Amino acid sequence: MTSPLDSHTRAADDGDLIQLAHDLIAAWNAHDPRRVASYFADAYTGDDVALAGRLHGRRDVRRYVAYNILGFPEFAR
C-alpha cells in the first residue's frame, strides 16, 4: 500500500494516516470543497447511499462537498 501522502516511494504509517484524517476533517470544517477534493485521486470512484449515482474523480467530489455545504451549512465548523 502506498501512502496517500507520498504515492511514489513509501508505505503509510499510522501517523501519516492519522494526520491525513485530521487534514481531511479540517478541510470539511473549513467548508473548502477544492481542498477536500484534493485528497481524492483523479481516478476516484465512490458511492454514497444518499446519491442516485456514483462519484467519479475530484470534480464530482468537489461538487458533492459543495452541495453538502450548501444544504447543511451547520454540518461542520
Image: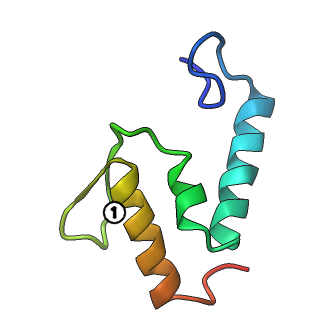
Q: Position of residue 50 (x, y in %)?
A: 31, 73
Residue sticking out furthest to the right: 15
Is residue 61 depicted above or below 39 in this figure? below
Query: Which residue is at a point 50% across and 54% down the rendered structure image?
Result: 37
Residue sticking out furthest to the left: 52
Q: Is residue 30 left or right of residue 49?
A: right
Query: Which residue is at a point 52% across and 88% down the rendered structure image?
Result: 72
Q: Nearer the viewer, residue 21 or 57?
A: 57
Is residue 6 depicted above or below 30 in this figure? above
Q: Position of residue 57 (x, y in %)?
A: 34, 47
Q: Is residue 13 left or right of residue 75?
A: right
Quadrant in which residue 16 is drawn: top right
* Secondary element type, mark 1: loop
Query: Which residue is at a point 65% across and 15% down the rendered structure image?
Result: 11
Residue kind at label 1, given as amino acid type: Asp
Query: Which residue is at a point 38% across and 68% down the rendered structure image?
Result: 63
Pointer 1 residue? 48
* Image quarter of the C terminus: bottom right
Quadrant in which residue 59 is drawn: bottom left
Colour convention: rainbow
Is residue 37 depicted above or below 4 in this figure? below
Q: Nearer the viewer, residue 55 or 18?
A: 55
Q: Nearer the viewer, residue 32 or 49?
A: 32
Mark 1 burial class by Cα count in 10 Å: few <14, some 14-19, many 20+: few
Q: Position of residue 61 (x, y in %)?
A: 40, 58
